[in-house]
Image (cartoon, rainbow, N blue to C red):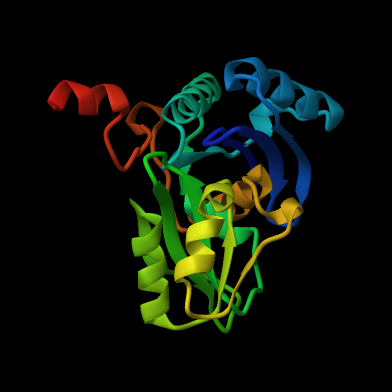
Amino acid sequence: MKIIAIDSSSLVASVAIATEESVIAEYSVNYKKTHSQTLLPMLDEIKTMTELDLSSVDAIAVTSGPGSFTGLRIGSSTAKGLALALGKPIVEVPTVDALAMNMWGSADLVCPLMDARRNQVYTGFYEFDENDELSVIKERFAEDIEKVVGMLNDIGKSVTFLGDGVDVSKEAIRRVMRIPFRFAPPHLSRQRAGSVATLAVKYYKEGRMVDSSAHKPEYLRMSQAERERCS
């Protein structure tokens, strides 16, 4: 099995080529360039470096959300275009689930945080079970950071935080958290297409795929323009 994975849900742009046994190539950039400028050149680079025959790919994996509205749309469009051109299915991977996979093997409760603006974060609660499988304790949602910390206090298990939402939430976490916690180091704290691919392999085996025409991002909340139109 061979999968191309794409994550453009945040400032990070990341693409990977992976099999069941290994991540063959991964290219990530955390810099202020639009994903429309970076994703396809990055994918072309790792395709060339690994001499990838695109016809040998089984599926295209993409983060389905939540995240940046523009970033998700670009990633979704790129994945849909590739899948349509190659006649391959799409494997949708929730963004915060893939982020949680960065902490594989952790004994802590894992809490990815993505900055959702307006003092909110996109998050979910995860842990790794006795078989080191990712277990979803609370599915992805958007909420005020202090309310998120309150939920974690109620669970009462030590927590590892990661994601770009940590940068804007540290003060609130330190003020409100009543249980042991820590922040993931920089090399594990941002989106990685390798983690997307790892989950995608599992989902592919489980038959969790969609046709390219059926895929669309899941934003979890309305965009600013939509909120202003409804107000």
Q: Is residue 37 above or below residue 182?
A: above
Q: Which of 83 and 185 is in front in this view?
A: 185
Residue 19 position, x and y percent, is: 70, 49
Residue 220 position, x and y percent, is: 31, 43
Question: Where does the C terminus fall, quadrant-wise?
Answer: top left
Residue sitting farthest toward the left: 231
Residue 38 position, x and y percent, is: 67, 20
**Residue 65 quadrant:** top left
Circle count: 0
Tell me the residue at 53%/58% (across/down): 171
Residue sitting farthest toward the top: 37
Tell me the residue at 30%/27% (across/down): 224
Q: Which of 169 and 86 is in front in this view?
A: 169
Tell me the residue at 45%/39% (across/down): 67
Q: Is residue 174 above or below residue 206?
A: below
**Residue 50 quadrant:** top right
Q: Is residue 166 above or below residue 127?
A: above
Residue 159 appears anywhere in the view = yes
Residue sitting farthest toward the right: 49
Tell me the residue at 57%/79% (across/down): 180
Residue 202 appears anywhere in the view = no
Q: In this view, does 1 lie above or below 228?
A: below
Q: Nearer the viewer, residue 102 or 227?
A: 227
Q: Nearer the viewer, residue 29 or 153?
A: 153
Residue 76 position, x and y percent, is: 46, 28
